[in-house]
């Protein structure tokens, strides 16, 4: 089924045949399937849950918004090798949604075969994680599992990656195939660990493959683990410790916009928080190439302090700042201040840490890009800008002589 088709309707009843060749169960735990892009995999009573935050840090999650963000499946995929022409995956998704009655959003599962995206399947079924910023105490309304089915695949042995939707927590219940499934080829390429905000997580992108870290990883042939957490790239130590303990060859940290969005820090605290975040990562990865990335362009807070708010004069989502340029002189943060400080910190530390590097986020998306390709809500990139950032990052970081190349 291709993107835009009707959502599947639930787990297949036993009396409804879907194929002449029976599908056989494939174990998701302890079998040939590798779950890549997860920091760890949690076993449940029904299946497995890919997780992007360390087990030791899970109890330190400070609020329900961060819980929803870290639970979502950005960059997570199943990898295996098979000759199957039909695959089915049973899932129980959990979707963050504003009420018990709002329509459930569809999310796309994407099938990549031998490096090419060949099919998508959508699902709008699952649990509701009911949350709004006006009522931040979330609760879960149980829903039903669903089956996503991919058929008509080319015959013959092939390498398969099944990418989960970045917007949902996805409990994997069962996998079935009409031919044996084997382990995928071992990872021999660079393992890239990336942390960022909703711009890296995806947010308004239409699907996982169009989020910029996934686009950059696929274009560069590197293995991505994304610990991008919407609204929660805040230099938290629980995130730094997760990154410290996660396997990685190269690491990038894109930071700044969430700190200004929420008016979370002043300049004094920001300086030491950056040092502490780098120190913690270096405890586990003392010699890995580590790239600190400053914010991409966001007009409302380029020179003004945060926080950002929704424009009350408009009915559509549109971000403005509630702060002023004058408040920056008092120690509040704008994106321009963050770029200056982050570049200075990296420059000074790199004198004793030559594997520490800096990338100005304006090289990924700047004021001229914003004039040509504006963000639909004045804050979050849609597919076109996600693609642009992904292409530029792939070249700057992973191209010849790139910042994440030796």
Image (cartoon, rainbow, N blue to C red):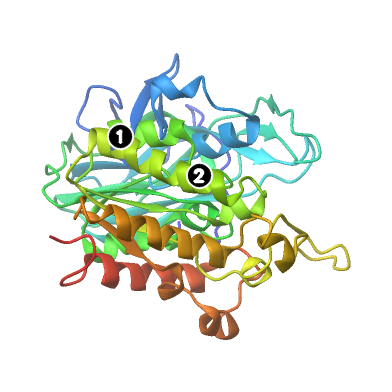
Q: Position of residue 347 (x, y in %)?
A: 31, 61
Q: Which quadrant of the figure has residue 374?
A: bottom right
Q: Who's the residue at 23% across and 57% down the image?
A: 154
- Position of 344 relative to 20 (above/below): below
Left or right: 310 as drawn, with respect to 110: right
The quadrant the C terminus occupies is bottom left
Which residue is disc 1 drawn over? 244
Residue closest to the far right: 313
Secondary structure state at the residue bearing disc 1 = helix
Residue 147 seen in the figure: yes
- Position of 56 relative to 112 (above/below): above
Left or right: 16 as drawn, with respect to 179: right
Which residue is disc 2 drawn over? 229
Q: So how many labels did they put on this image?
A: 2
Q: Position of residue 345 (x, y in %)?
A: 38, 55
Q: Which quadrant of the figure has residue 79?
A: top left
The quadrant the N terminus occupies is bottom left
Residue 6 seen in the figure: no
Q: Earlier in the sequence, mark 1 or mark 2?
A: 2
- Position of 94 relative to 164 (above/below): above
Instruction: Give the number of the mark in front: 1 or 2.
Output: 1
Q: Which quadrant of the figure has residue 39?
A: top left
Q: Are marks 1 and 2 in contact (CB under 8 Å)?
A: no
Who is closer to the viewer here, 359 or 368? Answer: 359
Q: Position of residue 308 (x, y in %)?
A: 71, 58
């Amino acid at each position: 089924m291709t993107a835009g088709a009707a959502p599947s309707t639930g787990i297949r009843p036993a009396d409804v045949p879907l194929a002449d060749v029976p599908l056989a169960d494939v174990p998701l735990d302890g079998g040939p399937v590798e779950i890549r892009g997860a920091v760890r995999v949690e076993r449940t009573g029904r299946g497995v849950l890919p997780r992007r935050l360390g087990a030791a840090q899970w109890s330190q999650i400070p609020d329900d918004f961060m819980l929803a963000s870290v639970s979502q499946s950005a960059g997570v995929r199943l990898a295996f090798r098979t000759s199957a022409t039909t695959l089915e995956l049973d899932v129980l998704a959990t979707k963050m949604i504003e009420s018990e009655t709002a329509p459930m959003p569809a999310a796309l599962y994407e099938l990549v075969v031998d490096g090419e995206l060949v099919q998508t399947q959508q699902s709008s079924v699952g649990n509701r994680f009911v949350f709004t910023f006006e009522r931040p105490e979330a609760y879960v309304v149980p829903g039903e599992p669903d089956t996503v089915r991919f058929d008509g695949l080319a015959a013959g042995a092939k390498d398969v990656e099944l990418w989960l939707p970045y917007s949902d927590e996805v409990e994997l219940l069962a996998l079935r195939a009409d031919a044996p499934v084997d382990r995928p080829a071992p990872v021999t390429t660079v393992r890239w660990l990336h942390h960022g905000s909703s711009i890296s997580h995806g947010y308004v992108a239409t699907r996982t493959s169009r989020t910029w870290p996934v686009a950059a990883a696929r274009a560069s042939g590197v293995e991505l683990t994304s610990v991008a957490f919407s609204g929660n790239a805040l230099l938290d130590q629980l995130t730094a410790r997760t990154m410290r303990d996660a396997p990685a060859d190269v690491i990038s940290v894109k930071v700044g916009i969430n700190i200004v969005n929420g008016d979370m820090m002043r300049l004094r605290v920001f300086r030491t928080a950056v040092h502490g975040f780098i120190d913690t990562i270096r405890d586990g990865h003392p010699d890995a190439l580590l790239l600190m990335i400053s914010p991409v362009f966001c007009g409302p807070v380029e020179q003004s302090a945060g926080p950002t708010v929704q424009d009350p004069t408009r009915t559509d989502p549109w971000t403005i700042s509630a702060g002023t340029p004058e408040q920056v002189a008092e120690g509040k943060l704008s994106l321009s201040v963050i770029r200056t400080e982050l570049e200075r910190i990296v420059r000074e530390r790199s004198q004793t840490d030559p594997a520490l590097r800096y990338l100005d986020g304006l090289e990924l998306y700047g004021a001229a890009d914003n004039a040509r390709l504006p963000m639909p809500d004045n804050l979050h990139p849609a597919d076109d800008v996600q693609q642009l950032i992904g292409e530029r990052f792939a070249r700057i970081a992973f191209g010849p002589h790139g910042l994440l190349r030796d």
